[in-house]
Image (cartoon, rainbow, N blue to C red):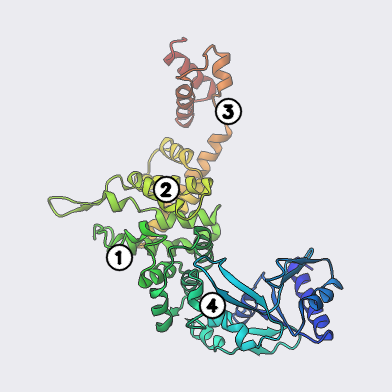
Amino acid sequence: MNTHEQDLKLSIEIAREVKAAGGRAMYVGGMVRDGLMEIPCKDIDIEVYGLRPAQLKEVLAKLGKVQEYGASFGVYGLMHSAIDIAMPRRERCVGIKHTDFEVSVDPEMSFHDATLRRDLTINAMMRDVLTGELVDLWHGQEDLRDKIIRHVGDETFPEDALRVFRAAQFTARLNGTVAAETMALCRSMKVDDISHERVFDELCKALLKAEKPSIFFRVLKEMDHLKEFFPEVEACVGVRQNPVHHPEGDVFEHTMLVLDCAAALRAHAQWPLGFMLAALLHDLGKIVATEIQPDGKITAYGHEVQGLELCEKQMRRLTSQAKLIEYVKNMMWLHMRPNILAGGHSKKKKTRQLFDLSVCPEDLILLSKADASGKLDEPYDAENEAFLRERLEDYRKVMERPMVTGKDLIQAGLKPGPQFSEWLARGRQLHFAGLEKQRALQQILMEAGKE
């Protein structure tokens, strides 16, 4: 029995003890929503009605060591379990931050009042842990079936501005649409004060869970809320492309198509999140590099380099994860080269050098495939991928062979200094050209004037 199965069994034990004490335990949130969609849900959230805090703690203590996450919030857990056990509570917004709420526990709260504080109808359903009875006061099951994202309360929904991004995220995951009244409400909300960490969390869910993550950005665009956290992505709107190579339209449209193509490949990526972010930002450079030539031709020469600064700005607006930022920038810098080298059947030296520059050659190949696939009426050339994977295998074999090291250079009489890194780079270049280690070392020594 795995950990999740153990928690499911434990949740039933909790519900039985709660019932014996005069209360009622309800599954809430994703557990109910995903269950109706027959999608596995790792999170088990239970809301307990009819018991006072002291009673609930006493009940839980029978099943394990109780963990308390703030007495005023009425949220508990059990050691060695991932189950969240909460009491119904009233919340009143007293500020602009997501933490600016007055919270009071109310064990006798009605289901209506308890679910009124939920964000969306699909998240406001509850299910009795013991009987399986579904409590759906806001027609969430109907909206889930019709793939409609609809808010619960006109007054409660705007109290947390993150719900704008949650609505977009769930729309993407359901491949659905936003109800007109919810769209209008989201447009009216101010989102500037949300922490970038919370927005990044919603972005990650859209990128990693949605079949078509593009919907997340299309919905935010319609809500006029790209500008606060995704201004570089928004700037892609209206940036023209050469219609011969990009019949799909502007850079934003191309990016959205590439993003959805990437979603179909992300299961094969070494770093799925980094890969999806690279797909999202790979063409930002076209914002500044695009020019219309005298003959009317549209070009974006060097956009893979010119976009690096924009890429870093967009990434740092969302996260401070240095490795993730560098990964995405590296993928942007190199994203055009795989298909160019494959199309020209370049020599092995060139592909070896390309893969050596890449932080993740496997993901770079996938990105080049997604980029080439994100166009209308232009299927991806499967021969390109076969060529690149064959060359990647060649690169790996070459990397297994001995290469000139710094120790070799020192033993041969070269002293560390300003030129040392150049000699090492030269050794790597000769290695990729096919020279054996000793011959490469001799060549370096000759060029350094040692032979």
- Mark 4 or 2: in front is 4
Using a 10 Å C-alpha cutoff, classify the residue at mark 4 as few (fewer than 14 neighbours), some (14 to 19) or many (20 or more).
Answer: many
Using a 10 Å C-alpha cutoff, classify the residue at mark 1 as few (fewer than 14 neighbours), some (14 to 19) or many (20 or more).
Answer: some
Structural distance between the alpha carbons of marks 3 and 2: 36 Å
Helix, strand or loop status at disc 4 = loop
Q: Tell me which label, 2 or 1, sits earlier in the chain.
A: 1
Mark number displayed over residue 119: 4
Mark number displayed over residue 248: 1
Badge 2 amino acid? Glu
- Mark 3 or 2: in front is 2
- Mark 1 or 3: in front is 1
Across and down, in percent, residue 195 comes to 50, 60
Using a 10 Å C-alpha cutoff, classify the residue at mark 2 as few (fewer than 14 neighbours), some (14 to 19) or many (20 or more).
Answer: some
Looking at this view, name the residue that lies furthest to the left: 294
Structural distance between the alpha carbons of marks 2 and 1: 26 Å
Helix, strand or loop status at disc 3 = loop
Helix, strand or loop status at disc 2 = helix
Badge 3 amino acid? Pro
Name which residue lies at 47% across and 54% down.
366
* Residue at image mark 2: 312
Q: Nearer the viewer, residue 65 or 406?
A: 65
Structural distance between the alpha carbons of marks 4 and 2: 32 Å
